[in-house]
């Protein structure tokens, strides 16, 4: 029986490249569906869960880590691999803390994706060699705690969506259109975000989304 995989990335070229590698490998792996954003992944998972979710970290509407958090909240046994161009500690930290089992860099994904899928499917971790030193350093037990984490955890799902769109440079009007909200509702969410995070300037809010790995660097 094949390992069933959902591949999510907003770049068609990336999806096509990874699909080609997997199909040419003749391994027992099958990409059963593709998605361009996190919301599509959640819809697919709702209809028919799969064995492995391969998620780009920088998808629009709902990024890979937020998507992983929602998948794992609904199904703690979900097996997820993050694809990323970022090897910074904060991205790896957030992914592993939320329960992701694999984190591979896009620059080496072609060489590593098959092994990563097999390892994560077996219940083991897989990290690209370039970031595995973070585990050796023991960062999982030393960072990401305290007031910042508490504030982030206090955000609602909608507030997280609004925060990501703010970090991606969207105006209130654009956020309202993308999330199908009234403009005044977006203003309320923005005000609540600033209050909960104790951030009172637009520039500082954007910097926060970058530091926390919520939006693109």
Image (cartoon, rainbow, N blue to C red):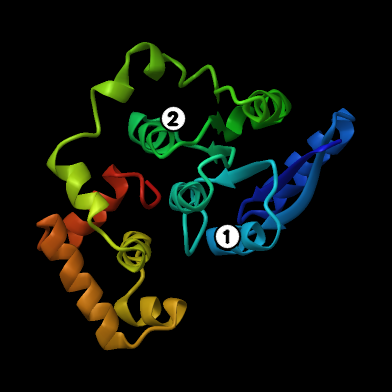
Q: Residue at x 27, y 22 (%)?
A: 141
Residue 19 location, quadrant = top right
Along the line of sight, the residue nearer the viewer: 2 or 34: 2
Q: Secondary structure at mark 2?
A: loop
Q: Which mark is residue 42?
A: 1
Along the line of sight, the residue nearer the viewer: 24 or 99: 99
Along the line of sight, the residue nearer the viewer: 139 or 204: 139
Q: Residue at x 56, y 30 (%)?
A: 104
Above/below status of 185 relative to 68? below
Q: Position of residue 196 (x, y in %)?
A: 14, 60
Going by the image, does 10 lie left or right of 26? left
Going by the image, does 201 lie left or right of 93? left
Q: Residues within 10 Å of mark 2 (few under 14, many from 20)?
A: some
Q: Nearer the viewer, mark 2 or mark 1?
A: 1
Above/below status of 83 relative to 196? above
Going by the image, does 38 lie left or right of 109? left
Comes first in the chain, label 2 or label 1: 1
Per the image, the residue denoted by label 2 is 87
């Amino acid at each position: 029986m094949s390992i069933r995989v959902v591949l999510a990335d907003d770049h068609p070229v990336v999806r096509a490249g990874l699909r080609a590698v997997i199909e040419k490998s003749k391994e027992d792996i099958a990409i059963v569906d593709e998605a361009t954003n996190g919301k599509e992944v959640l819809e697919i998972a709702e209809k028919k869960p799969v064995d492995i979710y391969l998620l780009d970290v920088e998808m629009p509407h709902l990024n890979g880590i937020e998507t992983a958090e929602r998948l794992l909240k609904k199904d703690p046994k979900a097996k997820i691999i993050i694809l990323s161009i970022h090897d910074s500690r904060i991205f790896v930290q957030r992914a592993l803390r939320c329960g992701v089992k694999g984190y591979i860099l896009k620059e080496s994904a072609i060489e590593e994706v098959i092994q990563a899928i097999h390892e994560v499917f077996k219940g083991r971790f897989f990290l690209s060699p370039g970031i595995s030193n973070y585990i050796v350093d023991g960062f999982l037990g030393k960072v990401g705690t305290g007031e910042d984490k508490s504030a982030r955890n206090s955000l609602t799902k909608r507030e997280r969506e609004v925060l990501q769109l703010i970090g991606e440079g969207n105006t209130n009007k654009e956020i309202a259109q993308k999330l199908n909200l009234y403009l005044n509702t977006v203003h309320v969410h923005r005000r609540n975000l600033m209050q909960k995070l104790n951030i009172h300037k637009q520039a500082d809010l954007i910097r926060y989304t970058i530091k926390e790995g919520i939006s693109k660097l």
